Image (cartoon, grey):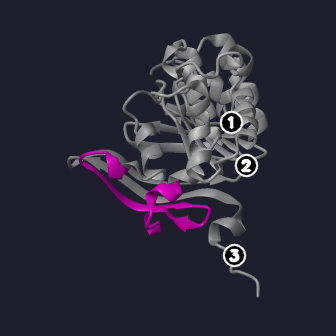
Amino acid sequence: MSLPVQVGEAAGYAIEVEDLAIRYHGKPALSSVTLQVPSHEIFGIIGPANSGKTSFLRAINRMDLMTAGMEVSGSVRVEGRDVRSWRNPYALRQRIGVVFPLPVGLPLSIYDNVALSSRLRGTRKKADLDVIVERCLRRAALWDEVKDRLDSLGSLLSGGQQQRLTIARALSQDPSILLLDEFSIAVDPVTTMRIEEVLAELKSEMTIVLVTNLVQQARRLASRTAFFLTGELVEVTETEAMFEGGAQDPRTTAYVEGKFG
């Protein structure tokens, strides 16, 4: 007997958000957001500071459970399943990798930073872990710089290298969704371009949600882009159309043209 197909799976959506609202200690941060993110797409989110972009990511990954005073209402479904139906939020987060603006390193070696997730899932053979560590570090454009010092502490790497280590660690989860929150803040422009090339390849394997304050980065990478402003989803449209005069709202056009933000 075949298993029933979830709504999100049938529609090809990795993420479906309906009437999402977020408050912090009663103060609104995001209101009435409804959108869908298709599977295997890089979905961009742009907007000025305090527009609700990071709050949106937190709701997807149930980070409200770890954020004091954060209240979430509305519906968020990941691959057809409401995120609040997961009795174990850690199982949900296993499917969703997250990279924050500044590197969050673990007090472990470079090797152990990347191998940790696989070990927690039961992988014990060093040969298997070696393959995983190398693959993830290569994807994060870091392997060539650290392959001869994998036993060194990850915290001894430069800021940009630590951020790429964070990306490698997120990829080691084998996530179906990768959330990137201003990942390039601590990364130099050359390395940023290298990581962008990796992300363009990864969308064949996973769905990527890219929050960025660099509108041209969204233009380079995202198939569609959402514009957030003061807690409101102004619009979602094809990225190239947004940058070529096809935005539906004049506020979007003004933002991508650099008139404010």
SS class of the residue under badge 1?
loop
Q: Which residue is mark 3?
A: 5
Q: Earlier in the sequence, mark 2 or mark 3?
A: 3
SS at badge 2: loop
Of all residues, the one furthest to the front in this rendering is: 125
- The residue stretch that appears in magenta: 64-92
Give the Cα distance between marks 1 and 2. Answer: 11 Å
Depth check, front residue: 111 or 65: 111
Camera-nearest label, 3 or 1: 3
Residue occupying image coordinates x 71% and y 69%: 10
Of the residues shown, which amino acid type is indicated by label 2? Answer: His
Q: Could you classify mark 2 by the number of other residues whose Cα lies within 10 Å: few (under 14), some (14-19), or many (20 or more)? A: some
Question: Taking the image as drawn, is residue 240 in sight?
Answer: no
Residue 155: x, y in percent?
Answer: 48, 19
Instruction: Identify the element where label 3 is drawn.
Output: loop
* Amino acid type, label 1: Ala
Q: Residue 49 in the image: x percent, y percent?
A: 40, 27
Mark closest to the chain's N terminus, 1 or 2: 2
Give yes or no for contact between labels 3 and 1 (Cβ–Cβ under 8 Å).
no
Q: Amino acid at mark 3?
A: Val
Q: How far apart are the two marked residues, 3 and 1, measured between alpha carbons?
A: 28 Å
Residue 109 location in percent, x, y?
55, 25
Residue depicted at 51% across the width and 52% down the height: 93
Name which of mark 3 and mark 1 comes first in the sequence.
Answer: 3
Identify residue for label 1: 222
Residue holding disc 2: 40
